[in-house]
Structure formats: structure tokens, C-alpha cells
Amino acid sequence: MSSVQDTAAMITNRAGAEAPQLAIVLGSGLGELADRVKEATRIPYEDLPGFPRSGVTGHAGTLICGFLNGARVAVLAGRSHYYEHGDAGAMQHPIAVLAELGCPVLALSNAAGSTRENMPPGSLMAISDHLNWSGLNPLIGTESDKRFVDLSDAYDPELRGWFERVAEAQGQVLHSGVYAWFSGPAFETPAEIKAIRMLGADAVGMSTVPEVILARYHGMRAAAVSVVTNFAAGMAGATTSHAHTKIEADKAKEGFIALFSGFAGTFAQS
Ligand code: HPA
């Protein structure tokens, strides 16, 4: 694999040397935000060594550099999940490259199941903290004491506040809650959902946590928002299928796009 510096140079050669103010990772079925990027330079992941070769439907594989609502952004349309290959560190290289580019913020999105009756499909939830239920960690095998990352405020409270202010100004409800990472690809059992709910999870999903750990490892500030696509397994009205996830994510996309565009706008003003 080429070095982090080499991959970063490939990006700056095509998209310009100015660092993105924020990077955005798009979750399942949420790719349309990428179409809102202006003056876009689109770089297929195939051209970027160490970027994922996504085989999951609902996930493209393109890096889009340009402007979203006036902010310089790098949008990652497509991510690598642990369940694709069993490598929890699969996003190590792309996130290291973003850090190398000088990008200070990683804002992630995902599709998630809700464990709360008052947070139905279509809801948006700012992640306030996580439960790493998978027991995996993308930093296993990393050398140096830098690997002992502090995750006390992993989901940056100030950035969360910006999401909240944007949602309020747009008249959108933005829930706040704890996201539990399950490895997937099988969905959870009703017993697992019952347990994780008792342990404090408000939403469950198969991504984001390793990327947040990696962002913090690289000194980037992190924020994440879940788009609720279903009630979790065993709950009344629960539907757990990938097809359903994509359909519900698509239905929620307008609110999601408005929220992330508004969030980006706060960087344009800063
Ligand atoms: N569980 C795990 N991942 C998910 C779910 C779920 O219920 N919905 C969307 N992604």
C-alpha cells in the first residue's frame, strides 16, 4: 500500500492543496448529499490506494472534494464495515489521509435501528456516546502509546451543539443518544436488543464506532448522526432487513441533507 502521504498527495494533485474544513462520511442509502457538493472533484476509491472497495449496496465508493453550503468539504461516499472482511481497522488509511490533508473534523452518518419507542423510523439522532459492543478495536496492533486514546468526549460536545442549533433553526427534531456498535452483518436478536437497551443504548448499528476511534487517534474532532431506519429487533413494528434500511434511509434523506448542509454552513462562517 502506498503511504498516507502518497495518497494525500494524489488527492491534493486533483482537488487542490487547501485542507477540507470537515470530512463527511455517508451512511447506507444517504449518498445523495454528495450531489449537493459544488465545484466537486470526484475521485473514485479505486484511484486511491488503501481506500475501501465497497461491495455493499447503498454505498458508493467515491471521494468528493468541493464546497457544501460554502464550507470546504471532503465527502466519503462509501465506507468499509468490519462485517465485509473482519478488519476493524479498514478505515485506518482513509482517516489517516484526511488527517494528513489537515482536515480537523470528521462528521459521520449512519443508518441505525432505534431501541426507543419515541424515536421511530425517520428520526435523526446525534450520537452523544457509544457502546463498543463488538469488543473490536481498530487500533489493535498499532504501536506506540498514542493507541491509548481517550474517548471521554469522543463525540465532540461543541460540534453536537452546532448540529442541535442547526436542527432547531430548521424546525427539525434532533434526538440525542448512545449508539451501540454490533459487528453485523446479521441483525441483532431480540434478546440482544433487550440487553443493550438496559445497558443504555438508544440506537444500534454496524459502523461509525471504529471511525470515531480512528478520528480521535489522529487528533480529529468527531461528530455523528444516526438516521433511524427501523425499530430494533423484537420491538413492536421492528423490520430488520437491508432492503428496508435503504428504503427508509432514502425517505429520511431530505432532513438529513438539510441537517448536514446546515452543519457545514457553520464552518463556512467560522
Ligand atoms: N441493527 C443494526 N444495524 C442497523 C439496523 C439495526 O436494526 N438498522 C440499520 N442499521
Image (cartoon, rainbow, N blue to C red):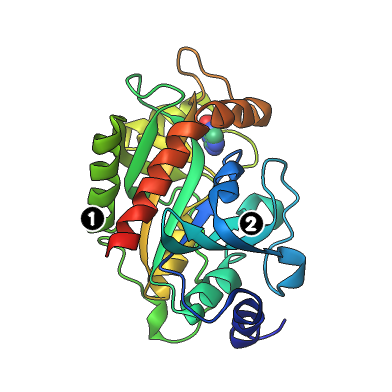
- Residue 193 place in picture, x, y as percent: 45, 30
- Check disc 2 and report its element: helix, strand or loop: loop
Residue linked to disc 2? 80
Which quadrant of the figure has residue 82? bottom right
Residue type, numbered disc 1: Pro
- Residue 84 place in picture, x, y as percent: 70, 52
In the rendered image of this protein, does residue 235 appear above or below residue 111?
Answer: above
Q: CA distance from mark 1 to mark 2?
A: 26 Å
In the rendered image of this protein, does residue 70 appear above or below residue 150?
Answer: above
Judge whether residue 125 can be spotted in this image.
yes
- Residue 63 place in picture, x, y as percent: 63, 62
Judge whether residue 192 can be spotted in this image.
no
- Residue 78 place in picture, x, y as percent: 64, 53
Instruction: Give the crowd class for mark 2: few <14, some 14-19, many >=20 residues within 10 Å.
Output: many
Of residues 41 and 194, the one drawn nearer to the viewer in this rendering:
41
- Quarter of the figure that contains the N terminus: bottom right
| Image depth: mark 1 or mark 2 in front | 1
Residue under the image location 35 percent in, 50 percent down: 263
Residue under the image location 35 percent in, 54 percent down: 265
- Quarter of the figure that contains the C terminus: bottom left
* Whether the residue under disc 2 has CB within 8 Å of ligand 1: no
N-terminal-most mark, 1 or 2: 2
- Check disc 1 and report its element: helix, strand or loop: helix
Residue type, numbered disc 2: Ser
Residue linked to disc 1? 157
Of residues 23 and 183, the one drawn nearer to the viewer in this rendering:
23
Residue under the image location 64 percent in, 57 percent down: 80
Q: Which mark is residue 30?
A: none
| Total numbered badges shown on the rendered structure | 2
Which quadrant of the figure has residue 71? bottom left
Q: Quadrant of ligand 1?
A: top right
